Image (cartoon, rainbow, N blue to C red):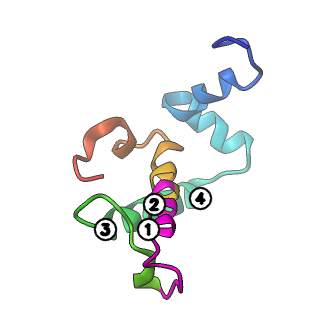
Amino acid sequence: MGVGGGGMAGCFGYRDGGGRKKAVGRFGGSQATESSVEAALRWLARHQEADGSWTPSKYDCPSGNDTRCRVGCTGLALLAFLGPATPRSRGSSPTT
């Protein structure tokens, strides 16, 4: 199906501006949940390695030195920044 033709196409409108505020209320969010998301993104940004990755071995992951595990964890961490349209995900943070 082409762009805009699927049922999920409009859901991305919730990520920014007034749409995000409406979605927070509509889907059970609150100022507390929004604060938690921001805190989690700050934690991820603080723990990012200089090469842009995240190293799971620092957090007692038995497979943390495995390249596949490191790549997977990095992908999941980056995915967290793509969800909300925060100033960081819009490009205001040059470090993440």
Task: Point out the tag, 3 or 1, that comes first from the N-terminus.
Answer: 3
Instruction: Quote the CA–CA distance across marks 3 and 2.
Output: 18 Å
Instruction: Quote the CA–CA distance across marks 4 and 3.
Output: 20 Å
At mark 3, the secondary structure is helix
- Name the residue type under label 1: Thr
Q: Nearer the viewer, mark 3 or mark 1?
A: 1
Q: Are marks 3 and 2 in contact (CB under 8 Å)?
A: no
Q: Are marks 3 and 1 in contact (CB under 8 Å)?
A: no
Residue hosting label 2: 71
Q: Nearer the viewer, mark 4 or mark 3?
A: 3
Q: Is residue 66 on the magenta stretch? A: yes
Q: Nearer the viewer, mark 3 or mark 2?
A: 2
**What is the quadrant of residue 22 in the picture?**
top right
The magenta stretch spans which residues? 60-75
Residue hosting label 1: 67
Q: Are marks 2 and 1 in contact (CB under 8 Å)?
A: yes
Residue hosting label 3: 46
Residue 96 vs residue 64: left or right?
left
At mark 4, the secondary structure is helix
**What is the quadrant of residue 48 in the picture?**
bottom left
Up the image or down, 46 lies above or below 24; here it is below
